[in-house]
Image (tube, rainbow, N blue to C red):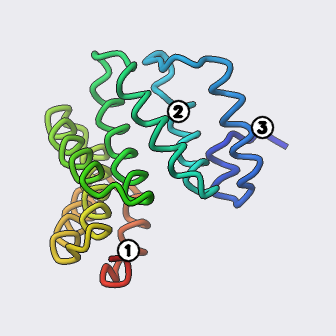
């Protein structure tokens, strides 16, 4: 059997295994690094959110943003998107919206369509959590249209699943 990382275990519903692997990876290199693209932090944030530990995800996002290499603008934008999603889960709506919009702004400057689609999805979700389903739906449409241009199947799947914003707020 090939080795399975935290992200794989989270999406295959081995949540405890995902959290365990994520925590072990973070312990091996506790300082965010641009060398490996913030992958341990990203996997841990996903695992924490899937495990119902969104506050841990928020804290890791904030710590990563504060200490990550300033030159890694892609990673910073991605972490802002993660913060938007995680902060929304714990009810920090102002922080979620601020992170989402800052992430989108940075993603636009980076110019990576998948990153821009992800931050648009994070903005849609933050707006929906905050009770603005109409604005959320606009950003969801934007995320989907960008994702279609680069065949980003994860964003396409997530935007397809997120069609009834009225049930979120």
Q: In which quarter of the image is residue 23?
A: top right
Q: In which quarter of the image is residue 70?
A: top left
Q: Assign a secondary structure to mark 2.
A: helix
What number is the disc on residue 7?
none
At a point 57% along the width and 31% down the height, the residue shown is 40
- Residue 59 is situated, as x and y percent measured from the top left of the image, at 47, 37
- Residue 154 is situated, as x and y percent measured from the top left of the image, at 44, 58
Image depth: mark 2 or mark 1 in front: 2
Q: Assign a secondary structure to mark 3.
A: loop
Q: Mark 3 points at which residue?
A: 3
Q: Name the residue under label 2.
A: 41
Q: How far apart are marks 3 and 2 (CA)?
A: 18 Å
At a point 24% along the width and 65% down the height, the residue shown is 127
The front one of 26 and 119 is 26
**Identity of the residue furthest to the right in this view:** 1
Q: Which of marks 2 and 1 is nearer the N terminus?
A: 2
Q: Is residue 33 found left or right of 148 in the rendered image?
A: right
Q: Is residue 78 found left or right of 5 in the rendered image?
A: left
Figure check: 52 above or below 128: above
At a point 32% along the width and 51% down the height, the residue shown is 118
Callout 1 crowding tier (Cα within 10 Å): few <14, some 14–19, many ≥20: some
Image depth: mark 1 or mark 3 in front: 1
At a point 47% along the width and 15% down the height, the residue shown is 35
Q: Assign a secondary structure to mark 1.
A: loop
Figure check: 28 above or below 2: above
Q: Mark 1 points at which residue?
A: 162
């Amino acid at each position: 059997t090939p080795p399975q990382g935290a992200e794989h275990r989270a999406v295959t519903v081995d949540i405890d295994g995902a959290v365990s692997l994520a925590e072990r990876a973070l312990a091996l290199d506790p300082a965010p690094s641009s060398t490996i693209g913030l992958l341990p932090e990203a996997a841990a944030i996903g695992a924490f959110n899937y495990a119902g530990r969104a506050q841990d995800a928020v804290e890791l996002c904030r710590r990563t943003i504060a200490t990550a290499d300033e030159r890694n603008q892609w990673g910073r934008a991605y972490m802002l998107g993660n913060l938007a999603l995680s902060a929304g889960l714990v009810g920090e709506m102002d922080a979620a919206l601020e992170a989402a919009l800052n992430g989108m702004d940075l993603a636009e400057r980076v110019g990576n369509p998948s990153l821009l689609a992800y931050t648009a999805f994070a903005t849609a979700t933050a707006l929906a959590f905050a009770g603005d389903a109409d604005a959320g739906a606009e950003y969801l449409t934007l995320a989907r249209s960008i994702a279609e241009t680069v065949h980003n199947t994860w964003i396409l799947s997530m935007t397809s699943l997120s069609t009834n914003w009225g049930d979120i707020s």
